[in-house]
Image: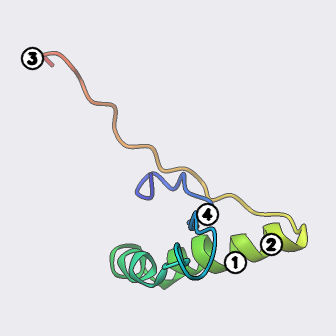
Amino acid sequence: MMDARLVHFVASDAHDVKRRPPELARPYEFVLDRWGDGEADRVFIDHPWAALWGDAIEPPTPNPKRQRSWSFFG
């Protein structure tokens, strides 16, 4: 989904800081390494803040992959 630019947010389902803390450092580093700082900041920082404050979110232009053929012949 990240390759196709279909992700708007990356978030945690943490419920409290003791039993299920919001551990997003590793996922942020993964996205940073694979897609760069612009994409990492967009899905971890910019869009979540915009949603929190009720600001508009500019969705990225999707980048669909080439359609695969599920046939052996083409």
Which type of secondary structure does the marked residue at label 2 adopt? helix
Q: Residue 58: which quarter of the image? A: bottom right
* Separation (CA) of disc 3 from disc 2: 46 Å
Q: Quadrant of residue 68?
A: top left
In front: label 3 or label 4 = 4
What whole-number distance in Å separates the C-alpha atoms at marks 1 and 2?
Answer: 6 Å
Q: Are marks 3 and 4 in contact (CB under 8 Å)?
A: no
Rendered location of residue 1, percent (x, y): 44, 51
Q: Is residue 16 above or below residue 60?
A: below
Image point 51% across, 77% down: which residue? Answer: 40
Image location (x, y in percent) of residue 27: 42, 75
| Picture residue at 55% right of the left edge, 77% below the top | 22
Residue 61 drawn at (x, y percent): 60, 54
Q: Amino acid at mark 2?
A: Ala
Mark 1 and mark 3 lie on one chain; the one further toward the N terminus is 1
Identify the residue under disc 4.
Answer: 9
Callout in the foreground (3, 2): 2
Whichever of callouts 4 and 1 sits on the residue coming sooner in the sequence is: 4
Which marked residue is nearer to the observer: mark 1 or mark 3? 1
